[in-house]
Image (tube, rainbow, N blue to C red):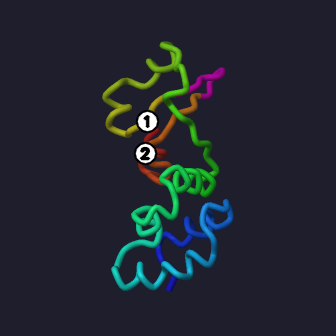
Amino acid sequence: MAEKDDYLVDILVDLGAVSAEQVAALRPEAQSAGVGLVDLMLANKVVRPADVTQAKAAHFGAEVVNLSEVKVADDVISVIPRHIARKYRVIPVFKHDNTLTVALADPSDLDTIDSL
């Protein structure tokens, strides 16, 4: 049976963040400990959190944005009310014509995407 984070593991291998040999060596330990393979790789510093973020972005067809490097215009930030931004953990980043680009804390949260 495939583990729930196997899609991320496959992407991490494809990105070169971890080797297939490392994955094969860690998989039995993750299974016996009852933890996810990605969590184990993070705990053992086999991969970095940034690698996992990049893998998730690749899976969802999203782009990783370092918000500390982005200057968001006041007219863009005001498009989404603060209480909505906090509730859904989103930040408006860019606006072009009638299209608003937002940064999501969790791009797999389909409820948030649907609500927006």
The range drawn in magenta is 93-99
Circles 1 and 2: CB atoms closer than 8 Å: yes
The answer to if 96 sits in the magenta stretch is: yes
* Residue at figure coordinates x 32%, y 37% from the top left: 87
**Which of the pair 39/89 is nearer the observer?**
39
**Which of the pair 62/64 is nearer the observer?**
64
The x, y position of residue 9, in whole percent, is: 56, 69
**Which of the pair 80/35 is nearer the observer?**
35
Disc 1 crowd rating (10 Å Cα; few below 14, some 14-19, many 20+) is many
* Residue at figure coordinates x 51%, y 64% from the top left: 46
* Residue at figure coordinates x 63%, y 54% from the top left: 58
Question: What count of labels does the image hold?
Answer: 2
**Which of the pair 43/89 is nearer the observer?**
43
Between the C-alphas of marks 1 and 2, the distance is: 9 Å
Circle on res. 45: none
The x, y position of residue 23, in whole percent, is: 56, 76
Please state which of the two labelled residues, at mark 1 or mark 2, is closer to the viewer. Answer: 1
* Residue at figure coordinates x 42%, y 50% from the top left: 111
Circle on res. 112: 2
Q: Amino acid at mark 1?
A: Val
Which residue has dot 1 on it? 90
- Element under disc 1: strand
Depicted 4 relative to depicted 110: above or below:
below
Among numbered discs 1 and 2, the one appearing first in the sequence: 1
Q: Amino acid at mark 2?
A: Thr
